[in-house]
């Protein structure tokens, strides 16, 4: 069916043209243009020197490319269209690959800080674990790529199992801020690419699936959003709901320069009260004065009990108490008639390295009766229905420049430094909320 000899070049199956060889292997005469090494196509010349058939368009002297026509008259258009089609195909494939690789649905790894054994020693209790696939957004949920993680004193209560009935392993961390990378069915409040801040157990991770009810949108992604989620909202609800914040009263705030204390100081001052704050060093003293504290007590230099008895003989109307132990006893002994104590925590006893106070309820009964003092515990999740209202108010106050959401200036980076940040807090070194920044490029392709 196919006449003619095969090319004499070893292994070549093409048909010979001249000299027993195909075009590729020299099967043609040389171009007769002086000094040209190219092979002749027709009339003894190569393409460059006029070889080839002339374009069949009338009066056209150009060489035909295909279909008997030159480029100007349509020769080669089919090849051009073919090339364009192939290019379009490549572009579509490239776009598909790009969207696949950038989508959270694509198989990627990410890391999470898990509690692997129960302990108040956060460093010993936790381990960074790599997951082979990103979390998926189920109905009513979104997946957030975290950028900033919030550190809280109660993190060691989490690793000690106080908030989790299930045995380890389980997630750690309470709040974070980042970017929405996937939206589950039924979610209309946010879209992919939105910046959000949220509170959820298991926030110490690079990617987290979060219920939409725990998410608050942000105009920009900044560590300044994190003081609000757990600390700010808790402080606002505790002082107004539990403390029945009023005006012209004396408000006592322990750990006043911390993540929650800073909000209580400012909210109490805005309501027209006299505010006393406690702290551990002179740098914090100056910070609290700038926030509006009327009296700051550095407990490493002054006796809190002595100051209260001398300067506030009528007692304290509201106490925001986070320390526990001997601090709680001192506060209780200096309460005013109809005073309210908010038990926000007992951080001095979280680690178990300080003996629990022997101060008992029976020792409190007479004072509570005779002074009509009330002691009220606070836990944020028991007030979930009013969280949106308090968050909206805090954001409004910040926007108006009436409220500062302080972030501790010490920098921490990556999941590896979460234990360092917690040690920093328990060493009483932080001023404001401690925030950990995660690298922009997190997760990896398999």
Image: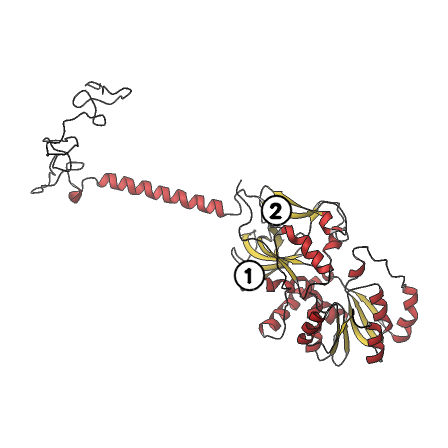
Residue 35 visible from this viewpoint = yes
Q: Report the front residue among 134 and 327.
A: 327
* Element class at badge 2: strand
Looking at the image, residue 326 lies above or below residue 418:
below
List x then y, in percent, for residue 81.
26, 42
Q: Residue at horizontal 29%, vertical 43%? A: 84
- Quadrant of res 368: bottom right
- Quadrant of res 261: bottom right
- Quadrant of res 303: bottom right
Quarter of the figure that contains the N terminus: top left
Residue 87 located left or right of residue 376: left
Looking at the image, residue 262 lies above or below residue 152:
below
Q: Which residue is mark 1?
A: 221
Using the image, tell me which numbered label, if any, was put on residue 232: none
Measure the alpha-carbon separation of dots 1 and 2: 21 Å
Looking at the image, residue 272 lies above or below residue 44:
below
List x then y, in percent, for residue 205.
62, 50
* Element class at badge 1: loop
Residue ranking furthest to the left: 59
Q: Which residue is mark 2?
A: 111
Task: For label 1, count other residues whose C-alpha is less than 10 Å away and answer few (under 14), some (14-19) or many (20+).
Answer: some
Residue 347 located left or right of residue 411: right
List x then y, in percent, for residue 245.
74, 75
């Amino acid at each position: 069916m196919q006449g003619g000899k095969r090319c004499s070049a070893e292994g070549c199956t093409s048909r010979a043209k001249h000299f027993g060889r195909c075009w590729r292997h020299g099967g043609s005469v040389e171009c007769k243009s002086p000094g040209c090494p190219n092979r002749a196509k027709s009339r003894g010349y190569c393409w460059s020197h006029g070889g080839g058939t002339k374009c069949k368009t009338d009066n056209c002297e150009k060489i035909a490319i295909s279909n008997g026509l030159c480029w100007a008259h349509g020769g080669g258009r089919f090849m051009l269209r073919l090339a364009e089609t192939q290019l379009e195909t490549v572009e579509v494939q490239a776009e598909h690959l790009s969207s696949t690789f950038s989508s959270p649905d694509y198989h990627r790894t990410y890391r999470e800080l898990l509690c692997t054994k129960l302990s108040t020693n956060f460093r010993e209790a936790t381990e960074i674990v790599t997951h082979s696939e990103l979390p998926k957004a189920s109905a009513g949920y979104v997946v957030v790529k975290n950028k900033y993680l919030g550190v809280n004193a109660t993190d060691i209560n989490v690793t000690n199992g106080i908030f989790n009935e299930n045995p380890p392993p389980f997630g750690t961390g309470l709040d974070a801020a980042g970017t929405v990378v996937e939206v589950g069915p039924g979610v209309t409040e946010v879209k992919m690419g939105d910046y959000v801040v949220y509170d959820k157990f298991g926030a110490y991770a690079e990617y987290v699936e979060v219920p939409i009810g725990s998410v608050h949108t942000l105009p920009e992604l900044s560590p300044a959003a994190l003081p609000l989620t757990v600390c700010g909202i808790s402080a606002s609800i505790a002082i107004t709901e539990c403390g029945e914040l009023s005006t012209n009263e004396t408000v006592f705030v322990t750990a006043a320069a911390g993540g929650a204390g800073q909000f209580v100081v400012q909210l109490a001052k805005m309501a027209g009260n006299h505010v006393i704050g406690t702290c551990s060093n002179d740098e914090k003293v100056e910070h609290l004065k700038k926030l509006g504290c009327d009296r700051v007590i550095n407990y490493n230099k002054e006796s809190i009990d002595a100051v209260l008895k001398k300067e506030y003989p009528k007692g304290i109307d509201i106490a925001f108490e986070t320390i526990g132990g001997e601090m709680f006893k001192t506060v209780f002994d200096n309460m005013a008639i109809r005073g309210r104590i908010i038990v926000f925590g007992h951080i001095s006893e979280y680690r178990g390295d300080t003996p629990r106070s022997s101060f008992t309820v029976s020792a409190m009964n007479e004072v509570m009766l005779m002074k009509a003092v009330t002691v009220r515990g606070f836990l944020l999740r028991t007030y979930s229905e009013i969280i949106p209202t308090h968050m909206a108010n805090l954001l409004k106050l910040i926007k108006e420049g009436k409220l500062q959401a302080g972030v501790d200036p010490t920098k921490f980076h990556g999941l590896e430094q979460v234990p360092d940040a917690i040690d920093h807090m328990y060493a009483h070194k932080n001023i404001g909320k401690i925030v950990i920044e995660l690298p922009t490029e997190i997760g990896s392709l398999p």
